[in-house]
Amino acid sequence: MINSLIQGILLGGYYALIASGLSFMFSVMRIINLAHGSLAVLAGYLLFVLAQRFGISPFYGLLIVLPVMAAIGFLLQRFVLDRSLRAGPLVPILATFGLAIVVDNLLFQQFGADTRSLAPYIGTLSYDSFELPGGIYVGALAVYIFVTAVVVLGGLQLLLSFTAIGRAIRATAEDPETAGLVGIDSRLVNAVAAAIALVTVGLAGAALGMRATFDAYAGGTQLLFAFEAAVIGGAGSVWGTLIGGIVLALAQSFGAQISPLGFLIAGHAVFLIVLFARIFLPRLILMRRRA
Amino acid sequence: MDAQGPILVAAGLHKRFGALVVLDGVDLAIAAGEAIGIVGPNGAGKTTLLSVLSGAQQPNGGSISFKGGDVTALSAPVRCRLGLARTHQIPRPFSCMTVFENVYVAASQGGGFSRDESYSRVTDSLALCGMLDIANRPAEALGLLDRKRLELARALATGPSLLLLDEIGGGLTDAEASELVETIRELRRRGIGIVWIEHIVHVLLQVAERLICMNAGKIIADGEPASVMANREVVEAYLGGSAP
């Protein structure tokens, strides 16, 4: 019981990490990036290639992959999303959906259907564990991923609250036109925000590859988990994303206790319950007040 | 002032929204440090003129030059950094931020000032607008007067040489409006040029040294305030003095 609680919370760290970029992009640009999971898998493959062909440890590989992801985010916003946003809120969703298909199939063409993992390239970290009092073992990697998620989310919060670019991002998110009139170049600011979001995607891709296996079509599942965590946590709220990830993971790990199939079903069920509660509870409360 | 030539020149500005012509050949030259009032009936194109000058909207025809360079194709943020700022008729603060942050983001982005200089700019702008004591209040909690002041402080913090004000006195009491007039006079003493749209003419005339009257997208009178107010066309179009 306590064991699945702790494992669930740690898994929640991974979900929060992958959800952070999705929720950040939604709160700033109002774009739901359906290519989010595929881009995380792309980052995983990049790290894999660096490790396999050039013998670069995935940790050093991040020094190369994160800037690449940032550049992808900047260019994606500047040349695809920014233009498609002008055609209405639905068009960027279609554009990222198309991008997801392109990324998935390019990866499939390049790497085939074999599953890959970064686990062989990170030494003992893939199976190291800490012993907690009570004879509970927690994976060292899971703990590090959880800490990374907290640092990323805290970093995003600090960035938004206290830096010049963070304030420009918030101003642009609220009112791009007025932001322009006080000298904020909203296109540039959004491109920087997308670059930041994709850096978190790169980290999530590294975490995915180290803790599990992935293949060319793994992006869809990752997107789904990220989306569920972001919605449960209240899309756009930084710490809510962490809570959302943990709630999703707890539901999954308790679901798995009940039945092997319960892992996914319980996660989806909690997501749907929260989603409907979000939609209908405020109405119910309003109706009560009026009555 | 006269030796430098005009700081802003607009020539033949046209703006249409579909079939509706909102600006119909507006020519305007503004000297550095000048204080200009703009009056005119609703729908005359006053606000659209400010939007086109500030770069929030692109004109369908005509050109704008600012400080000797053509800015017609430049975006609003670029014009803002050149020293052209505006306020909105209906204040649009960033409500997710505090008063201080609202002004700070303008100073650091629009003014391009360093951190320390931005801080002193913010303090200065807030002090000038009488908002220092409420600097840490969230912008969404402000009343109308404070929202208007914030609009002004935010525009000021970008370090403008020409400030476009859109009905900043609208909806205020006489006492509040005269407080605002004092602030705007202080801006003039600092050499900042003002273009001010206002319906409360007696407030406007306390500051403006030149008055422009617009009607149906055209400038119908431009000159010394007393003579513009006495102009027959102005009286008919705006004041409704000699209605048929």
Image (cartoon, rainbow, N blue to C red):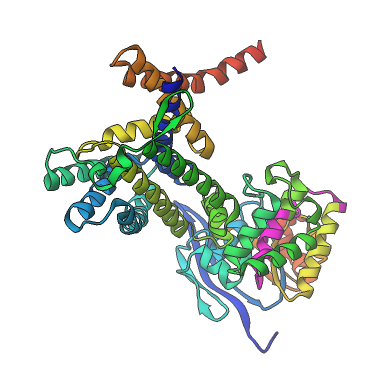
| Residue B161 belongs to magenta span | yes
Residue B205 position in % (x across, y down): 80, 65
> Is A59 situated above or below A10?
below
Task: Tell whether A223 sits left or right of B139.
Answer: left
Residue closer to the observer: A176 or B99: B99
Residue closer to the observer: B89 or A123: A123
| Residue B200 belongs to magenta span | no
Task: Tell whether B64 sits left or right of B146.
Answer: left
> Is A267 situated above or below B180?
above
* Quadrant housing the C terminus of chain A: top right
* The residue stretch that appears in magenta: B150-175
Instruction: Identify the residue shown where x is 38% and y is 21%.
Output: A253
Residue B225 position in % (x across, y down): 77, 69
Instruction: Identify the residue shown where x is 21% and y is 56%.
Output: A55
Residue B65 position in % (x across, y down): 53, 76
Instruction: Identify the residue shown where x is 17% and y is 56%.
Output: A53
Residue closer to the observer: B205 or A236: A236
Q: Quadrant of residue B6?
A: bottom right
Instruction: Identify the residue shown where x is 77% and y is 71%.
Output: B227
Q: Quadrant of residue B103?
A: bottom right
* Quadrant housing the N terminus of chain A: top left
Residue B31 position in % (x across, y down): 66, 78
